[in-house]
Amino acid sequence: MSPWLRRILLFVLLGVLVIAFGNARSKRATRVAQATEDGFLLVGNGTEPATLDPQIATGVPEHHILSAIFEGLVGDHPSDDHQILPGVAERWEHVDATTWTFYLNPEARWTNGDSVQASNFVYAYERILTPKFGAEYAKLLYQIDGAEAFNLGETDDFSTVGVKAIDERTLEIRLVGPAPYFPSMLKHYAFFPIHPPTIEKYGAMTDRFTAWTRVSNMVSNGPFTLTHWGFGHYIEARRSETYWNRANVGLEGIRFFPIVSDTTEERAFRDGQLHVTNTMPADRVAYYRENRPDEFRTGDGMVVYFYRCNTLSKEVPQLGDVRVRKALALAIDRQSIVDNVTKGGQRAAYGLVPPMGGDYVTPNVLRFDPEKARALLAEAGYPAGKGFPKLTILFNTSEGHRLIAQALQAMWSDHLGLEVELLNQDWKVYLDSQEKGDFQVCRAGWSADYIDPATFLSMWMTGNGHNQTGWSSPEYDELMNRSNRTADPALRNAIMNQAETIFLDEVPAIPVYWYAINRAVSPDVVGWHHKLLDSHPWQHLKVRKAGTQVEPVSAEEGAPVLP
Amino acid sequence: MASAVTSSSPQLRSTRSGSPLQNAWRRLCSNKLAVFCMILLSVIILACVFGPLVLSNPNAQDLELGATPPSAEHWFGTDTLGRDLLARSLVGGRLSLLVGLVATTVALLIGVTYGMVAGYRGGRTDSVMMRIVDVLYGFPFLIFVILLTTIFERSIYLLFAAIGAIEWLTMSRIVRGQVLGLREMEFVKAAQVLGQGTPQILFQHLLPNVLGPVIVYTTLTVPGVMLLEAVLSFLGLGVQPPDASWGVLINEGAQSMETYPWLLMFPAIMFSLTLFCLNLIGDGLRDAFDPRSEK
Amino acid sequence: MIGFFVRRLIQAVVVILAVFTVTFIMVRLAPGGPFSKERTAPPEVVAAMEEYCGLSDPPVVQYFRSIGMMLRGDLGPSYIYEGRTVNELIATAFPLSLTVGFAAFVIAILIGLPLGILAAVRRNSLTDYLAMGGSMLGICLPTFVLGPLLALVFGVWLNWFNASGWYDGSDWVLPALTLGLFYAAYIARLARAGMLDVLSLDYIRTARAKGLDERSVIGKHALKRAILPVISFLGPAFAGLISGSIVIERVFQIPGLGFHFVGAAQNRDYFLAQGTVVFYAVLIVALNLLVDLVQAALDPKTREGKSDD
């Protein structure tokens, strides 16, 4: 056989093999198809959770998993952030201005069969509030009478704290002020109960670094049970056979995949590996809107992207001058950033508190007014930026933050004539710098812990650890304190509105935009609603092959719903 | 006398400079592929150095324009902030080539000195020094560079030092090997008899004779250095914005590869082309200096 | 031979200790610690945590404590992933890196070696130019460009493999291919160069002159000598595969060791960072030792301590 003929035959054979292989591979069942059939939901979950201990956790990925395997006093509504459903508590009542009583469902059980008792909540709150436990979300419980004093170590007698188990099924909580929004705060995992015997089996109540959260050791009370925790791989939770409402849990199980890179995640979604993504890269948003609108879910998020000003900066003391800060704020074309840089449906922030769909009205103060900005800067003594020291913008290393910082740099340089430099640091270094006040202007973000403006406003009070700007206003503090003592929601909103106006007039921190939550959701998923707080009660979801009929899971079964 | 010596012992070069280098140059020029690459590389370098002076400002943003494919106005297209990609690629090239040059020089200085000392001293000193090299050779320095860049504030000088500190190893081995062979030669012994000091022997007599392999491996080190810088930039540990190097541009391009493929293509092609040229020139140089291994 | 082995072993221990010390110092020099977070806890609380973890002891004490722990095989707890030990994390992550690394290595050898030898044997033919051109391309395309490209073509467009992740049995293919092709290119060039060197040697010409069949000439005599440069490349190749895995794991979202290492450095998880580095050091030193032994067996010159350039 001539060598050329041999070569041709070889190529042909190779070609046939390749095509056959390709054909077999591309026709293989996608992971999503298999999962849908099995009733499993595949969710992209950002980063690997640092812990699954509800009193230690602080992040959003942890939140998503915790809301599957644990349940608090109240439950989250699948579509409305302002409503709450019964959870471990089947009903509750507002006994007087500051006291709430919760009546626990006798069917609420832990995964080992023990019933969930009121004392489990008391134990959990003592644990999180104990100073040496070092819980970061202890502050969330400060609404409870005596909690702050206990957490700061002023007393070590927990009976001074306003949580009491009246009996096995009744929990009484006494607050500092009226806090009408308190029950909705209870959706947060810091308020979840834990199972004392399990904790004690692996260490003392306040020991950290124990092994109780391992799959084989964990005892929880939610609609799902933790069944697999492959580090960096995926976390699986299956429907719990001991959950009181198990008859109405739509899914067989959930798998959470920690995919850090959003581009990788989006590719995985298109590949048929995920039902739901955690986010969506900005440059894919347009593509999805146009070509796959059924799979693209977008909506407002309760997160504000802002820049902190260090009013006590030694290198740029001008930042202590409110006119300078206002000039900086007015020179930002927020709409342009949102339209051209972030491009994901974010909203230009005209205030600090993102619109929450409730009755609170955010003051409409921030705008893009370069003329006024220049005038203010001149008034402060730096016409056209002359004489103003070099300003450094600090942000943590990330493509997105970099782009926005660069846009800001150009805006402040073009409109105000300032010389602006960029500095990016790794996350830890950046946090350290912020804490030490080693910055001039730095990028930051804040997300709502609960659905009330106070979650964005309380951090700016004097002495609050999250202020980090050196700004202090007695009027602001007074207004916020008064709002804490006000029971009437309308009056309270008005007071907070005043406080926010003061904040926006002095801009110690400059809001830029409000987040949008963008996700890709497979048509196989039933019952997915956009939520402002981005918390999705998993038991109300179902998966079925797109196109087949199924009844949606009803949320309003049973108990009364309190705002 | 010189020509008789060179033809029978190809490793020996007379200390009267010019002749062997000229020979090598002639051989290099007859290698058409190498010549082509040299021309191409020069074009790239010139473009990177002088191009940005002529073109539009690479940092000029045009937010409303956003990313656009190549057009008459923007030959390489624009990126997500509306910056001209051609200008950015050329400026990025400046930085990449600069890092390549400086880090390689650092590596060169350390490596050549180290290798010469080890080879000349011989014996225990050589043994110990080379053990150190052997040991360091197998280690993934990327890990230490990562640690370094997370600790110290990222600066270009840190990059030079860190990368240079990794790449000197091969150089030292090569030089040491050469020197080992050379130090038994008569002209060295003659210098020793004359009472010349070690530094003088090293730099006056030995150095010119190791120049050949050094040049070759320098040319081959530059692409390695540039690749390392690109990897660091990919991991987010390299150059800081708004500066860009090819590594940064490639990383940005890879992120939006499917939506704006030109953002990846152009920097990647320029980068690969430069590496390609450098490698081929290095190969050509190796052939030119060592005609024994005809390829 | 024994003396050689013992010398290398002592060297190995010194290296590992040095590596650990440098890492120990470096992670502690970095600003920020494992407990600086966005939602700041009061300083008293942070102090309490640090004391609990032994971080408030003087560095020297911590240093020797760490060494003591390592000698017992305990790499310490992770600070960022509470409740998990570094041993556990490495045990989970390493097999993934190993699979990809090993597969890449095999691909590199299976593609690179034959290609290089073929190119040398058919010198200056079309095969040679194609092979060398291809290998040059492999060297000039970084893994973080090739990786996404392969993911795009084979993962998304053709849908032959998953574009990322580590869930199906076939997920090792694309990452291993990306890494492997890169090293195949190097190996091809080295093999070709080594082969050419050998083929021009006198004793090969003698064998040919004697009329021995071409295949046996190549097979028996040349191959053994030609592989030497490839073997000496193996040391840095292993190191490279490990570094390369850091990038690959980022591109393909594989929860391997490199991935954790970068996270540990960035999050100041002291024990995880130290543990990973020491683990790598032990691995590389062991592999280098192996390579040296093989080389010594094949080439008597190395045994006497003369290293070739």
Image: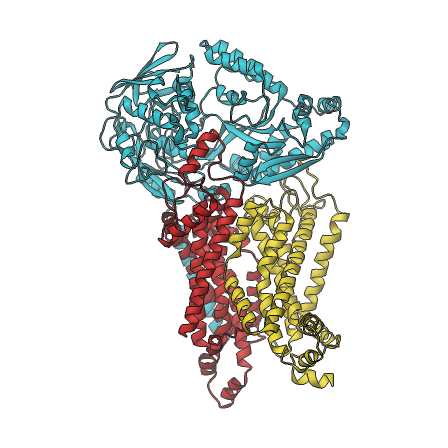
In the displayed structure, C74 sits above or below B4; it is: above
For image coordinates 50% across by 55% down, the residue present is: C243
Residue A44, position as x, y percentages in the image: 42, 39
For image coordinates 47% across by 14% down, the residue present is: A484
A236 left or right of A440 in image: left
Q: Quadrant of the C terminus of chain C?
A: bottom right
B225 left or right of B191 in image: left
Report the front residue among A511 and C283: C283
Extreme left residue here?
Answer: A113
For image coordinates 59% across by 67% down, the residue present is: B172
Q: Colour of chain C?
A: red
Residue C284, position as x, y percentages in the image: 45, 60
Q: Total marks drawn?
A: 0
What is the quadrant of residue C124 in the picture?
A: bottom right
For image coordinates 56% across by 28% down, the residue present is: A468
Q: Quadrant of the N terminus of chain C?
A: bottom left
Q: Which chain is cyan?
A: A
Q: Which chain is yellow?
A: B
Report the front residue among A77 and A98: A98
C242 left or right of B292 in image: left
What is the quadrant of residue A116 in the picture?
A: top left
Report the front residue among C125 and B59: B59
Residue C95, position as x, y percentages in the image: 38, 54
Residue C285, position as x, y percentages in the image: 45, 62
Can the viewer see residue A22?
A: no
Can the viewer see residue C233?
A: yes
Extreme bottom residue here?
Answer: C210
